[in-house]
Image: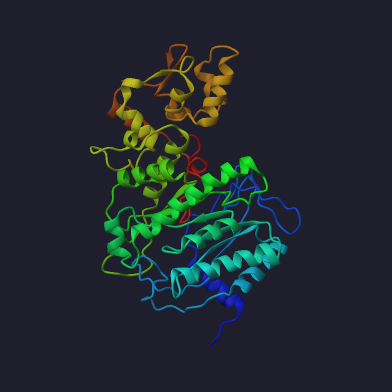
Amino acid sequence: MTLDLMDRLKILADGAKYDVSCSSSGSSRSNSNGVGSAASSGICHTWTSDGRCVSLLKILMTNACVYDCAYCVNRRSNDIPRVALTPDEIAELTIGFYRRNYIEGLFLSTGVVRSADYTMELLIQAARTLRQQCRFNGYIHLKLVPGADPLLVQQAGLWADRVSINLELPTRESLALLAPDKTRDAVVKPMRQVSGLITVNRAERKASRKVPRFAPAGQSTQLIVGATGESDRQIVTLSEQLYQRLDLKRVYYSAFIPIVTDSRLPARPVAPLKREHRLYQADWLLRYYGFAAHELLDEVHPNLDQDLDPKTGWALRHLELFPVEINRAGYEELLRIPGVGVRSAQRIIQARRQGHLGIDDLKTLGVVMKRARYFVTARGRYAGEGPFESNMLRRKLMDAPQRPVQLSLTLEQPAGLITGEL
């Protein structure tokens, strides 16, 4: 029985929902002669910082797959209806949804059929059809297929704004256990290639703006959290290496959801969403707050505190650095104060030029005082209460009323937008 287009679309959209590495384009493809455009403010499945809600058509090309990854709903041994879309159908759907103002771009992933190269060629054909025949200038995010030919990887980056390939599991051992058909090298090699091509493309475009852009929104990846026994320290250290060595735009974390059964998988009745949330916060500290992985986690503390955010946990382990005098601290020092974020640190620096700040001034500058009060002084005044001791401070911080946090199965917002200032 052949399903019609909309029935296939429903199945393939549902199969794509577990891949979270698809937000924040960072591209700026202009609309010179066609339809759509990719704005530098980003494309995502959530509310942006300026209040806009933007969206992608997020689908699989096919849910058929030659791989048998234990954690994947689309694995070959899972008994589900198998459907596919042709490149022309994908282009038709994308343009149709765009013209109805439902979407602003396309996120296209897939199961692997026949071979990595054959599947990659179909993905590229869909993107090329959109760009050339439909003259679509909107955002396109393509998944790379592990083991695909380097020439195909290069072509994908020329048609897409962002490309990504999911590491999924932090170690070779975990990958061999749960995804025996894949190898770590088959996943990492295309990531290295894309990183190198992006660097070369930036240099070439400085010499001539006529050089076509290559993946202008960069690349991202995804790690599954909780399917195997790695510590948070291993995950955060790996993310730091990916940012430093491959210049990734984002590492996304996906709490393991027990949607399929397999003897190799842990029996988890509830997805570890809170752990995922803490990893996003730690990732934010790596990228924007100047922290290193070894500062946040070590052999003594290999996992993030589930009761306190990572910055507060770090501060409680380093009370010798606190309290900080808010009128004398440098920008980097301000960023390490719990409750002080990037924007509030900038505001403090600017406001100090007009005169010394008092404790009462900090809240108006965006500082989260329920945390910061225990780690700062202003004009020599300390706003905390009781002894300046780790266990006492921890109890007070845990007793403080917390802002409600909405945990999501996708969590595609930056952690700072979920929790406010870190």
Q: Which of 379 and 112 is in front in this view?
A: 112
Q: Nearer the viewer, residue 280 or 197?
A: 197
Q: Where is residue 72 in the image (x, y as percent from the top left)?
A: 39, 67
Q: Answer with left or right where residue 305 lies relative to residue 208.
A: left
Residue 174 lies in quadrant: bottom left
- Give the residue at x 57% y 49%: 217
Q: Residue 119: give x, y in percent of width and height.
A: 49, 70
Give percent across and percent down for residue 262.
Answer: 30, 69
Residue 224, above or below 14? above
Q: Is residue 92 left or right of residue 266?
A: right
Q: Determine which quarter of the picture holds residue 165.
A: bottom left
Residue in the image at 49% along x and 31% along y: 341
> Residue extending furthest bottom?
1
Q: Which residue: 48% across, 43% down?
A: 415
Residue 21: x and y in percent read 49, 54
Q: Is residue 52 left or right of residue 69?
A: right
Up/down of 99 relative to 373, above or below: below
Number of marks: 0
Whether residue 409 is visible:
yes
Residue 135 relative to residue 344: left or right: right
Q: Which residue sits furthest left?
A: 300
Q: Quick check: 192 above or below 391?
A: below
Residue 266 visible? The answer is: no
